[in-house]
Image (tube, helix red, strand yellow):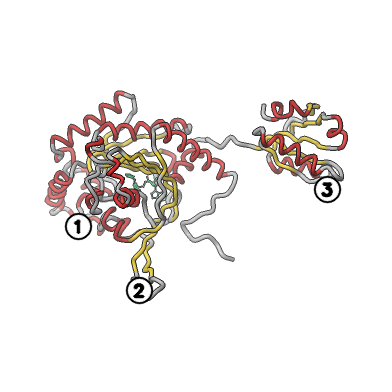
Amino acid sequence: MIRAIRGTRDLLPPDTDLWNRVEAKVRDVFARYNFNEIRTPIFEDTSLFARGVGEDTDIVTKEMFTWEDKGRAASEKSQSLTLRPENTAGVVRAYIEHGLDKQGKLQKLYYIGPQFRRERPQKGRYRQFYQIGAEIIGPPSAGSESPARDAEVIEMLATLLNDLGLRGWALELNSVGGAADRARYNQALRVALKPLVYQMCSDCQRRAETNPLRVLDCKVPEDQPIIEKLPKISAYLDDACREHFAAVRAMLDAVGIPYTINERMVRGLDYYTRTTFEFTHGDLGAQSAVVGGGRYDGLSESLDGPRAPGIGFAIGEDRLILALEAEGVTAAGSLDAYIAPLGAGMNSHALKLARELRRAGVRCDLGDESFRLKKSFEAAKRAGARYIVIVGENEVNSGEFAVKELASGKQETVVREKLKAYLSS
Ligand code: HAM
């Protein structure tokens, strides 16, 4: 028997109802903040991620699904391609490729779609997972560097999570400064780590050389006391970055969005500058980050594009669904009615009635005239319908229908014109 590949999963009804409800709410909320959808390819040139996400990140060194695409004709060169591990690099590539900077305005773009990382699968961590992301990017003259944009995306996320009914989220905030600040901080970490790193895990020993900031991501318990005593990034921010971060915090305070500062949160991608943030949820175990995001003021230039500061985030949709389920949030949409034709020649009448009701917005399922009454009731229950409507010769002639509520067994006669209101009450 052929099974789904480890780390991938099938999403089946009724679970997909909740996924659809989340995505409909996302599109509704994002539209209110003037975001428009972008769809980029699922695979890209490998170098986009190597240069965009960063050569020494875990994503690029260990987690990408990469293959050599041979090209079909002799004239076509072979090319290294990669399934996208995230969508920000693709959005910025599209921004550059289509000259969106020339519109001279902020681009507010969102996406919903699968991403791929070869991580060790566990609850909340998959090899194909889904992200809901948004980015604000544009020329500095359009205001893309303003801390108001950071506050806007974070406030939008808080609104979205609240509107979805999620309660147990927490926001962690940090500033990783500009490139120069980070270079100074990395140097300070190198110096501080030098006499200690031999006591740490092999990953930390490597990172202390290549990218000391990544040491802060280490989860090995024995390394934590050492990491806690390392220099803090806040001491290395220049005045402009410090003021920018203070402005973001002041705006969040003004709208009453609670957060904590986590100076160890450096995020797993190298493009971040200044504000970084995560929304976590307490019911998710080890994979507690539901949303990750931040500013990437130099990403466009590192991909040979124009200066185009930006900020954005991605929600892990799989984890958002797990968190909602843990809080008992479910999708409401159930079936209103099961239309049961009774007797030969009744299929057309039942289809006609179902057509009227469906066009009026009633969620209906439809039986078959070959079913006896008992079988129709069983089918209606299995379909999860609230009511069953019998369509027999007498009902069609009189225009009055027997309607039974399946849970209570209560039965009433309802005239055709009132059926819509009755069934959707
Ligand atoms: P990220 O933190 O790598 O950021 O991923 C964002 C979210 O995707 C995570 O918080 C998590 O919820 C979810 N996620 C990541 N990996 C997995 C996985 N293997 N299984 C399930 N869920 C996962 C980014 O991807 C950035 N592009 C976000 C961003 C947009 N920053 C600025 N703009």
Badge number at residue 16? none
Q: Are marks 1 and 2 in contact (CB under 8 Å)?
A: no
Does the image show residue 287?
Answer: yes
- Say which element carries label 3: loop
Name the spot of residue 61 as percent of width and height, x first.
30, 60
Residue 180 horizontal side relative to residue 36, left or right: left
Picture quadrant where residue 313 is located:
top left
Q: Quadrant of the C terminus?
A: top right
Disc 2 marks which residue?
A: 75
Quadrant of residue 260 within the rendered picture = top left
Q: Which residue is denoted by mark 1 in the rendering?
A: 210
**In the rendering, which numbered label is found on residue 370?**
3
Q: CA distance from mark 3 to mark 2?
A: 62 Å
Q: Is residue 96 above or below residue 79?
A: above
Decide if ligand 1 comes within 8 Å of the CB at mark 2. Answer: no
**Cα–Cα gap, marks 1 and 3:** 72 Å
**Marks 3 and 2 close (CB-CB < 8 Å):** no
Where is 44 relative to 300, above or below? below
- Does dot 1 land on a helix, a strand or a loop? helix
